[in-house]
Amino acid sequence: MEENKKNLVKALLEVQKEIENPKNTEINPYYRSKYAPLPDILNLVRPLLAKNGLVLYQDVGSTKDGAVCVRTHLIHESGESLSTSPLYMKPEARHKEKGKPTPQAIGSAITYARRYQILALLGIASEDDDANLASRPPKPGR
């Protein structure tokens, strides 16, 4: 860490003492796996962050080649902050006629990136992380 962030680190330590991994309550129908949805993750972390003087925010952008970009920031009430590296993801589903990502695919990529950035930044994981399953194509007949 380049600059002194002792207030932020102390607050984050207090959050990590109390936080639990989010429950996997949603089912991904494509991979038939369970995952913790973004609203559940936010509902879990926001009260603990606020209690310890921390604010979480995420900014979203895109690249010329159609990838989405998410960056997550954690700011302490003292002004100290911590930011993730940008996470770039290419939406997969495409319009048949236009060849461009569908709005649903863009939204899905953004939500996926937001979820994983929060989990990584706070040092937590969903119960059974579905990232490995999500990186493989589904088995035939599924």
Image (cartoon, rainbow, N blue to C red):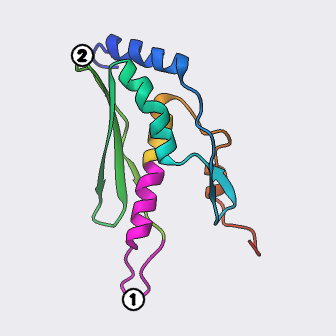
Does the segment drawn in magenta span residue 100? yes
Q: Secondary structure at mark 1?
A: loop
* Mark 1 and mark 2: Cα distance apart in space: 51 Å
Q: Is residue 90 left or right of residue 57?
A: right
| Residue that numbered label 1 is attached to | 97
- Residue visible at 30% across and 59% down in the picture: 62
Q: Is residue 8 left or right of residue 25?
A: left
Picture coordinates of residue 94 (x, y %)? Answer: 44, 77
Residue range highlighted in magenta: 93-113
Which quadrant of the figure contains the N terminus? top left
Picture coordinates of residue 49 (x, y %)? Answer: 40, 25
Relative to 49, residue 103 above or below:
below
- Mark 1 vs 2, N-terminal side: 2
Quarter assignment of residue 17 = top right
- Residue visible at 32% across and 67% down in the picture: 65
Picture coordinates of residue 70 (x, y %)? Answer: 36, 48
**Mark identifier at residue 78:** 2
Relative to 131, residue 49 above or below:
above
Q: Secondary structure at mark 2?
A: loop
Relative to 134, residue 96 above or below:
below
Picture coordinates of residue 95 (x, y %)? Answer: 41, 81
